[in-house]
Amino acid sequence: MPAGTASAASAPSGARPGSPGRGGDLVVEGGRLLDPLTGEVTEDAVVVIAGGVVRAAGARGRVGRVPAGVPVLRAHGQWILPGLVDAHIHLNTAAEARDAVLKGATSARSGSTNFYQDVAVRELARQSPERAPRLRAAGVFVTPDLGDTILADPDLAPLARLREGVRSPEALRRVVEVNLARGADTIKTRVNERAGLPEQDPLVQVYDHEQLSVIVAAAERGGKGVLCHSYSEKGCHDAVTAGIRSLEHGAFVGERTLREMRRRGTYFTPTLTAIAGLAESPDPVLAERGRTYLPVLKRAVLAAHELGVPLAAGTDSSGGTVDPIGREVELMHAAGLPALDAIRTATTGAAKLLGFASTAGRLARGFSGDVLVVDGDPLADPGVLSRPARVVRAGFSVPAA
């Protein structure tokens, strides 16, 4: 049987409407297994997945009896890793969700959607895990101008009459409360304007420390954390001291704020992929912005790593295009992180941020059967993670489109 193929198709069975779909049964065998937590590499490894959960993983001689009649994915000459985690992605369609899985992201956190599509994607992942990443949904963006998102929920409609948009404490709390009522797992807001729109200045601040504190407090009352779109140093500092859980983008974050992040345990999700993408834009304003911001952001990433700030990988994929999360790992490495530490930003590190520390980020007993098989050594070249030879989601070997 060719490497990287399964001997039989696995399909969900026994799932009932309203209940999570059962995972698949699969044995992955023959490759080198990397444990991102310890850095240990196991030769001629075997991973046994039953019902979508890892039952055993390790050297062939130590795994014990492999169940008979179970599909086998042979990975001889390849590397076996846990599925990767994209801590900042915008998934608006079922096709985008499946594409994210095919490109290696078996777990993810939404960076918000316009009409709660991510809440539905999260449920799709529970019912049919091979079609979507395990997801933390952010619901709708807490931002001054809701635009068409005002139509996402009738409870948001009264906010349309606010001349200055969503800025008052009452309005800020209302958007958070509606998100929580719709089932959001986390809250997304902003402190600066967008980098990806040429007419906006990403160094202009849109919410101040007091407003951000209102958002954080409202989220915490619902037991949720906040991820915050940010660029300027002052904006980053206001967001971090307001109590956000993770700082997104953060190109101009300074040492003072990074030290505060380390003290608080605030995560940094730099989305290097998105900033690198700006440099390739046909729009001259965006291209210049990307070329200017990327080296600054890389220095911030390295400084964060050296100071001990926890880092999480996120692509900020949006607009129908899904970037491989492996590309973010490659850029983390290019910023100066050792390869293993770069891999951890998309495995154990991001999994901890998302609350998946005992579910995702490793292939060990009790973890989800999410597997990435690649054709090269990711410790020598993290770029191989951008080109998965095979992806397994909850024990299902996901065929290419």
Image (cartoon, rainbow, N blue to C red):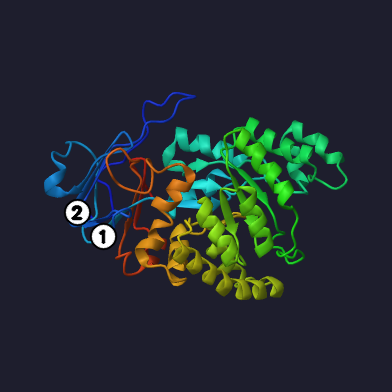
- Amino acid found under the numbered disc labelled 1: Gln
Circle on res. 30: 2
Q: Position of residue 245 (x, y in %)?
A: 56, 48
Residue at 53% of width from left, 51% of height from top? 264
Of the residues under marks 1 and 2, which one precedes in the sequence? 2
Q: Where, by quadrant of the figure, is residue 148 drawn?
A: top right
Q: Is residue 115 left or right of residue 171?
A: left
Circle on res. 374: none
According to the image, label 1 marks what residue? 78
Q: Is residue 352 left or right of residue 65?
A: right
Q: Position of residue 30 (x, y in %)?
A: 19, 54
Residue at 54% of width from left, 52% of height from top? 88
Visible residue check, residue 270: no
Label 1: few (<14), some or many (≥20) within 10 Å?
many
Q: Position of residue 101 (x, y in %)?
A: 44, 49
In this rendering, is residue 36 above or below 224?
Answer: below
Front one among 48 and 342: 342
- Amino acid found under the numbered disc labelled 2: Gly
Question: Alpha-carbon distance for marks 1 and 2?
Answer: 8 Å
User: Quick one: SS at disc 2?
Assistant: loop
Q: Where, by quadrant of the figure, is residue 234 drawn?
A: bottom right
